[in-house]
Image (spheres, rainbow, N blue to C red):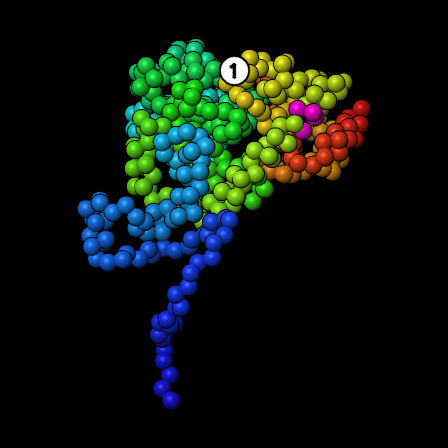
């Protein structure tokens, strides 16, 4: 009997079935996308084809998530990337070229600043760190070749807030692109395009996904720069796996409910911390004691579950370890925005003067655990320092 050889000896006919209707969208995998006929393929070469041409051309699950974020943010174009830092890097590359100069707010995400120092400078793109609480005084840092300003408001460690409308008004006059990392507030509690921002960035890894099991980021661009970014994204053949887009899209459905609980619990813990004798400052923009609280009240409609505090005493690493390692509900880990409460503690280095210089910043990401239990956990930890 003659045997057929090869990985696949014959193509088996597949039964044509009607797809099931589900609440959540299907996830698409694939590299090759089939055309209906040769005329469709010819349209691709003439730039007349509006469908999906290949697996890197944003499969349907990705496009559905992008459209949901675009509508939520009120932008012209949204594209999803493999992580929050990938979103920052792509936005910076899309709007700069050799010989340009950019300004980077000194409380912006650390890896994004390192990308400017280590990568952009290699391609003759200069950058200047600017104070974390900058506003209309940004004009003094501008150069004739400044083309972009990167902001993060509030910063995710020391929580300074920039005067966004003052900055964007100056930038528009000089045709400078403004990019804002708005991950802390999510699109629910801050509308950057209403404040004149050109490009927004979100680490989808945080509140939008909500379960600490997704790596993704988004860049949303206004009408003025939308087509330019769209072309750059397509040229780079960037795409994000369908599973990440599916989970992020699922997270959007519960974002408002989760964020309300994060906000409420974080404010409860923050206000309690203000009564603890060991604590010096609680760095939460929604508290009246925050230096930029007036900007938060003007520009934001809510707050999230991430904030920091400082101690009155400068404890040694060994003393801090006795506090941190005694905690049971607060896990040690980078990132934030998930259901699990997290903690980090470190001194933060700044390139510009900082009101928190040489202070240990303890950052809390308040999750969805019972708020009273979280306070008791911290109480037990503080007892290790007395």
Name the magenta segment's main secondary structure: helix
The quadrant of the rendering that contains the C terminus is top right
Give the crowd class for mark 1: few <14, some 14-19, many >=20 residues within 10 Å: few
Element at badge 1?
Answer: helix
From where the camera sits, is residue 141 visible? no
Q: Quick check: is 120 in the magenta stretch?
A: no
Q: Residue 241 location, x and y as percent?
A: 44, 48
- Name, please, the residue furthest toward the bottom: 1
Q: Residue 225 location, x and y as percent?
A: 32, 28
Q: Which residue is mark 1?
A: 298
Nearer to us in this view, 268 or 331? 268
Please determine whether, in this image, residue 312 is positioned above or below residue 46: above
Q: Look at the image and give the residue range highlighted in magenta.
A: 265-269
Q: Residue 255 location, x and y as percent?
A: 55, 36
What's the residue at 30%, 33% (across, down)? 227
Please determine whether, in this image, residue 159 is positioned above or below residue 259: above
Quadrant housing residue 80 = top left
């Amino acid at each position: 009997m003659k045997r057929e050889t090869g990985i696949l000896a014959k193509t088996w006919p597949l039964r044509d079935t009607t797809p099931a209707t589900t609440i959540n969208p299907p996830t698409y995998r694939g590299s090759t996308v089939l055309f209906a006929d040769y005329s469709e393929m010819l349209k691709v070469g003439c730039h007349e084809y509006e469908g999906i041409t290949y697996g890197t051309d944003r499969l349907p699950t990705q496009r559905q998530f992008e459209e949901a974020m675009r509508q939520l943010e009120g932008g012209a174009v949204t594209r999803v990337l493999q992580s929050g830092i990938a979103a920052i890097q792509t936005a910076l590359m899309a709007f700069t070229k050799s010989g340009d100069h950019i300004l980077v707010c000194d409380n912006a995400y650390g890896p994004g600043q390192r990308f400017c120092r280590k990568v952009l400078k290699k391609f003759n793109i200069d950058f200047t760190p600017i104070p974390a609480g900058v506003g209309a005084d940004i004009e003094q840092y501008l150069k004739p070749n400044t083309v972009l300003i990167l902001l993060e408001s509030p910063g995710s460690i020391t929580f300074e807030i920039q005067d966004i409308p003052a900055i964007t008004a100056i930038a528009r006059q000089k045709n400078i692109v403004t990019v804002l990392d708005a991950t802390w507030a999510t699109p629910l509690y801050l509308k950057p395009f209403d404040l004149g921002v050109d490009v927004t960035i979100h680490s989808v890894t945080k509140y939008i996904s909500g379960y600490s099991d997704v790596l993704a980021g988004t860049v949303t661009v206004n009408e003025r720069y939308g087509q330019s970014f769209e072309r750059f994204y397509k040229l780079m053949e960037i795409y994000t796996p369908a599973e990440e887009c599916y989970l992020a899209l699922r997270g959007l459905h519960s974002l408002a409910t989760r964020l309300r609980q994060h906000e409420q619990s974080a404010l409860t813990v923050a206000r309690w911390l203000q009564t603890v004798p060991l604590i010096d400052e609680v760095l939460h923009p929604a508290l009246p004691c925050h230096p930029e609280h007036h900007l938060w009240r003007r520009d934001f409609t809510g707050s999230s579950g991430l904030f920091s505090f400082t101690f009155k005493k400068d404890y040694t690493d060994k003393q801090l370890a006795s506090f941190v390692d005694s905690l049971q509900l607060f896990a040690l880990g980078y990132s934030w925005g998930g259901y699990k409460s997290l903690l980090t503690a470190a001194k933060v280095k700044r390139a510009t003067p900082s009101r928190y210089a040489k202070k240990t910043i303890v950052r809390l990401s308040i999750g969805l655990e019972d708020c009273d239990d979280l306070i008791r956990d911290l109480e037990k930890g503080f007892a290790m320092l007395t």
